Amino acid sequence: MLRAVGSALFWIFITLSSLAMFPVALLCWALTLPFDRRKVVLHRLTCFWASLYTWLNPAWPVEVTGREKIDPDETYVMVANHQSLLDILVLFRLFRHFKWVSKVENFRIPCIGWNMYLNEYIQLKRGDRSSTSAMLRTCRQNLADGNSIMMFPEGTRSPTGKLRGFKTGAFSLAKDAQRPLLPIVVHGTASALPKRGVILQGRHQILIEVLDPIAYSDFAEEDVESLALRVRELIGDHLEKAQVLVR
């Protein structure tokens, strides 16, 4: 009963805070439009907006390790495992510039989705080949413009928290654009907010672990299937090793 009440209050807070924050984001977009072509300032505001939901929730203490490995002058293809809707909120805690690749349905969410449009995050209609092709073209252009890309190579959230197979799109993108890969491991979110669940599951430690970047020269001659498998195994190894740290 207490969890249900707490969860209801949390979702009400998300709704009310989004109604309050979207006009701020819209104003930020308008004021920075003439000089901030990459939407760096707006994205940083969005990081603050998203981080409110973990900063103000004592049930979700978040630790970020390895943030210093992200070179602000480098452009990456960032890849992270996907356990929960909560992953999106906690990855904003990196406070580094990137463009999300996100399913088109998320752009239809009032306020939050509208802000995604303002940030020029990248839409993907899952199962649609033409949408996938358009998404990859947009990603390549963003990388050329100096924007890192954030993708979930599993494609969708794992219903069990266990790592799913990796699709090759992110790895093809890194090879085509000759950009480094940045693996990121998300721990603990599946227990805090499982897929298809709306009830918060009590206190859970959440860890965001930034791994060492993989330079383009380290995979230039590797086929995308083996590269995807290699990065999946790397993330999987870190998930297993950190189980003791995530409660």
Image (cartoon, helix red, strand yellow):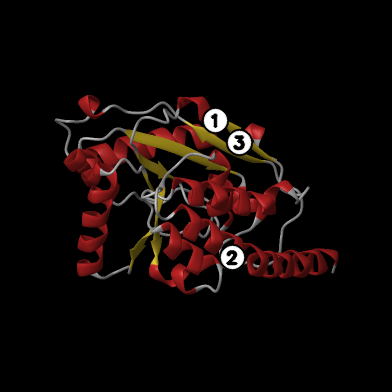
State the residue in front, 19 or 12. 19
Is residue 122 visible from the viewing direction of this image? yes
Residue furthest to the left: 221
Determine the residue positioned at 55% across, 56% down.
84
Q: Position of residue 126 (x, y in %)?
A: 33, 68
Image coordinates of residue 50 in percent, x first then y, are: 60, 53
Q: At 21% from the left edge and 45% from the top edge, which residue is drawn?
A: 172
The residues tagged by marks 3 and 1 sit, at their Cα atoms, a distance apart of 6 Å
Which residue extends farthest right? 2
Provide residue 34's location: percent of width, then percent of height: 39, 53
Where does label 2 land, which residue? 22
Task: Let me know if residue 168 appears in the view.
Answer: no
Crowding at mark 1 (Cα within 10 Å: few <14, some 14-19, many 20+):
few
Q: Secondary structure at mark 1?
A: helix
Q: Amino acid at mark 2?
A: Phe
Distance from label 1 to label 2 (Cα)?
39 Å
Say which residue appears at 42% left-offset and 60% top-offset. Answer: 156
Q: Is residue 78 above or below residue 2?
A: above
Circle 3 sits on which residue? 243
**Mark 3, residues whose alpha carbon is within 10 Å: few (<14), some, or many (≥20)?**
few
Question: Closer to the observer: label 3 or label 2?
Answer: 2
Give the quadrant of the N terminus: bottom right
**Marks 3 and 2, how far apart in space?**
37 Å
The answer to whether mark 3 and mark 1 are in CB contact below 8 A is: yes
- Which of the 4 image quarters holds residue 241? top right
Label 2 environment density (alpha carbons within 10 Å; few <14, some 14–19, many ≥20): some
Give the amino acid type for the residue marked by disc 1 in the picture.
Answer: Lys
Residue 241 circle label: 1
In the depicted view, which residue is nearer to us: 117 or 86?
117
| Contact flag, marks 3 and 2 (Cβ < 8 Å) | no
- Local secondary structure at mark 2: helix
